[in-house]
Amino acid sequence: MKLVFEKGMNLSEVEVIRHYSTLSKLNFGVDFGFYPLGSCTMKYNPKINEDMAKLEGFTLLHPLQPVSTAQGALELMHNLEKMLCEICGFERFSLQPAAGANGELTGIMIIQAYFRKKRENRSKILVPDSAHGTNPASVSVCGFEAVEIKSDKDGNIDLGELKEKMTEDVAGIMITNPNTLGLFDQNILEVCKIVHEKGGLVYGDGANMNAMLGICKPKELGIDVMHLNLHKSFATPHGGGGPGSGPVGVIKELVEFLPIPLIEKKGEEYVFNYENENSIGKLRSFYGNFGVMVKAYTYLKAIGAEGIREVAEIAVLNANYLKEKLKKHYNLPFDRVCQHEFVLDDSKMPNGVTTNDIAKRLMDYGFHPPTVYFPLIVHGALMIEPTETETKETLDEFANAMIKIKEEAEKNPEIVKGAPHSTPVKRLDAVKAAREPNLRWKP
Amino acid sequence: MDNPEDRKYTKGHEWAKKEGELIVVGITDFAQHALTDIVFVELPEKGKELEKGKQMCVVESVKSVSDIFAPVNGEVAEVNSELENSPEKLNQAPFDSWLVKIKPKDPAEFDSLMSSQQYNEYVAGLEH
């Protein structure tokens, strides 16, 4: 590829078009192919969502214009909140957090505010070893100490260890359910009970909500505060296509701590309510990533109540279909019915072929690699999440590529160890990039 | 690589060696191998109080970010700031590259750590 910028600024339209079209072909996105990145829920983003977010009535809004002239936008946010409450069983949601980690921060600050009001000094929060890396980070940013809880042999939270560590100085637990092994925690009701009995609160990380949509409500499992990722479960773009949105929902007892403003309906008018003296304040400028809310609202309206349950059903079916096809060829450390994703590892790979090699070789077959080396509790993990938007044909093609790679590892391991062979750049030197980062473009 | 007999070991794969009144701490060959290429080391400040089994330093590899725990209670006497510019030394020579020297609160705590033989057995158990 020849960069046209080398020639200076005198460019014809066709040169510019070819430049950007070439660049776009070097990229890989969910619009190009299968993208089974575990726990990221890289589902297809319907284009109608973009059309709705581009409506002039939305794009020409100014966040400071009088509320009486932006009633449609407030109504949309109000209705989106109501739908999220219905899906999760919560009393209220704040749509303000900008993405998942911002939502976690909001949730942990709410837990902190709750205990501050009760004048209870609790300094620790429990985090299972199968949690997302952001969980202990959010705990730590708020000044709590993160205490790790081990998983048992079935991949559930170890109840014995939980009982021992859930003391009166623990503010609560952060749970991802299904967890990062793609397993529904069979002890979830017991876990929430143990935490509640000691006066603690249960935080739900909604990263894996795709498997529960329309099937079970987090509130009914015992979760008190939770963030959702509109950019995962609700089909709005993420990765390079973001921004995200991480609404936080709470039970009735925690509504007073939600960020301000909340959106209320007074008579026929929608208003921003800033009157909440126990609120943790503002987590983001203005009202959150509004365009993302429009897309998620459109998605929910398009698929409806039945559609949302089908999302979870097909996501779980797709993951189990792939898991069953691949478990004869790859080691499956937790052989159980999975939810929306599952974890394989490289322990049965011949000739020293590793997870990293498998991931690189998948690119030659035209697939984005799955999440690798996560969760940390599985050595050489390959975490695969197909999502509900993929056809059986695509799943079969992916399974065939994985099986072919296993055969190559046996008969011709060098082709796997040297992959990728077909991409614009080959294996990057990750060590050199980390030790000597080059962060600035130089002409 | 053999685990030298001149020092003690922890379940967190740190090694600890007596040097006069101080205890020198590093990570084992098993640890550096599991971490893969180390690209960054965050060392504590001199004089910092250390609690046995709690975070002492942070080691970042291409693969993950890991806490290194204090093997005994005490105070940071010295840190190996050479590692800040050449963290790869922990991969190249784990038993010759130390992280922190600790002034122990109770010198007897050192004796309760694992011997090289006990550590060998512990690591063998993990690999099964």
Image (cartoon, coloured by chain):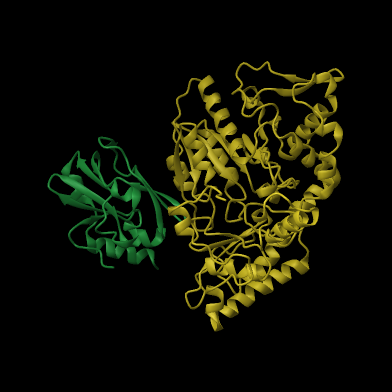
Residue at the left extreme of this rendering? B20
In the depicted structure, whether residue A227 falls above or below residue A322: above
Q: Nearer the viewer, residue B36 or A331?
A: B36
For the colour green, the matching chain is: B
Where does residue B89 sit, x and y in percent of width and height?
A: 31, 57
Taking A426 as reference, is A317 left or right?
Answer: right
Where does residue A158 sit, x and y in percent of width and height?
A: 49, 50
Count the marks: 0
Q: Nearer the viewer, residue B120 or A195?
A: B120
Taking B56 as reference, is A175 left or right?
Answer: right
Please name the residue shown 63% across and 37% down the image: A226
In the depicted structure, whether residue A259 falls above or below residue A397: above
Where does residue B2 sit, x and y in percent of width and height?
A: 26, 67
Residue at the bottom extreme of this rendering? A411
Please name the residue shown 21% across and 63% down the image: B4
The colour of chain A is yellow
Where does residue B61 sit, x and y in percent of width and height?
A: 43, 54
Indicate the quadrant where residue A4 lies: bottom right
Indicate the quadrant where residue A333 lies: bottom right
Quadrant of the image containing the N terminus of chain A: bottom right
Please name the residue shown 65% across and 49% down the image: A208
